[in-house]
Amino acid sequence: MSNDWVDVCIQECLDSGELLSRLDDPSIQGAWEEEGVLHLYWAEDQWNGARLASVRSALAGLIPSGSEIPIAVTCIPAQDWNEAWVRSVKPLRIGRLVIRPSWEPVALDSRDIEIVLDPKQAFGTGHHATTRMLLEWLQADIHGGEEVLDVGTGSAILAMAAVLLGATSAMGLEIDPVAVECAHEYVLHNGLKNRIDIIAGTLADVPEAKRRTADLVLANLDRQTVLNLADELAHVATRGARIMVSGILAEQEVEITERFSSLGLACVRRREEEGWVAMQFLKPESCDGEASRW
C-alpha cells in the first residue's frame, strides 16, 4: 500500500466546512485554507477519478454561475508529507486572537488570547473571511457573562473564542460526526471542556430552557442552511438574543435580510469582506426593551 499523499489544490475562496460537508468523504485526511486557496488531502491509494468528479460536482453546487474552478492535483511523496504540512500551516493573528498549530510557538503579548488548532478535517481555522469577520465582531461584542449558541460549530473556533473572550459558556451544535469529533478534541486540547458543550444536533435539539438563556447565537453557515434555520433563529431572538450570521455571499444578502425581516428581525449591522457578508440580527423591540441583555 502506498504511503504517498495527494494534494488537491482549489484556486478559489471557499468555506472548507461547506465543501467538506457536501463531499461527505471520510477518507479526506486534511483541509487547509491559505491566501484564497483551499487544499484537500487524500492518501494516494484512496484518490481516483470518482473522487475528482465528486470534488467538481460539490464545487459546482457552491458556485452556481457555471464557471469551472481551477483544480490542481499534486502527489506528495511520503517522506515530504510532514514537511509540506508544517510549511503550509502558519499562525494567524486576528486582533487579540492568535490561532496557531501546536508545532508553531508564538510570542504572546499580555492581552493576547491563544487558540491551538491543528488543521485536519477542521471546518474553520480563522483564515476564511466568513470566520474572520465573526472573530473580529466577538472581540467587540463579548462583554463578559454571555451564554452562546454556535450553530454549525465545525472546529468550535467561534465557541472557543467566545468563552476565552469572557462568555460564561458556549454550546457548539454540529450535524457532521467527523466535525463533532474534531471539535471535542480542540475543546479538550485548549482546556475548555468545562465551559463548552459540543452537541451532535441542531437548534431543534437544544432544550427550551437553554434557548431562553442564550445571549448570542452564531451561525456561520451556507445560504440554504441559514434560510432553513431562520424560524428557529428568530424564535431564539424573541428572548433578546443577538444573531450573528455569516457564510453568505454578497449577492445572497438581500434574500437573507428579507427572510429575517419577514420574521420580525432587523439587520442592525453588516460588513463585507472578499465577497462574503456577515450580518447581525435582533428583534427591534429588544434594542431598548426589557428582553435585551446587550
Image (tube, rainbow, N blue to C red):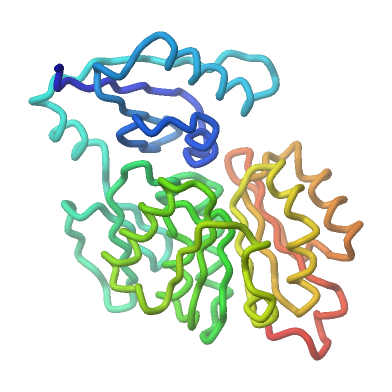
Q: Is residue 27 above or below residue 272?
A: above
The residue lying furthest to the left in this view is 79
Please indicate whether residue 282 sits to the left or right of residue 204 in the image: right
Please indicate whether residue 110 sits to the left or right of residue 158 in the image: left
- Which residue shows up at 62% across the image and 28% down it? 62
- Which residue shows up at 15% across the image and 17% down it? 2
Give x and y (percent) for residue 60.
61, 20
Quadrant position of the N terminus in the picture: top left
Q: Nearer the viewer, residue 23 or 96?
A: 23
The residue lying furthest to the bottom in this view is 290
Q: Nearer the viewer, residue 277 or 194?
A: 194
Please indicate whether residue 69 sits to the left or right of residue 188 in the image: right
- Which residue shows up at 13% across the image and 33% down it? 83
Give x and y (percent) for residue 256.
79, 48
- Which residue shows up at 14% across the image and 22% down it? 3
Please indicate whether residue 56 sits to the left or right of residue 126 in the image: right
Give x and y (percent) for residue 243.
69, 65
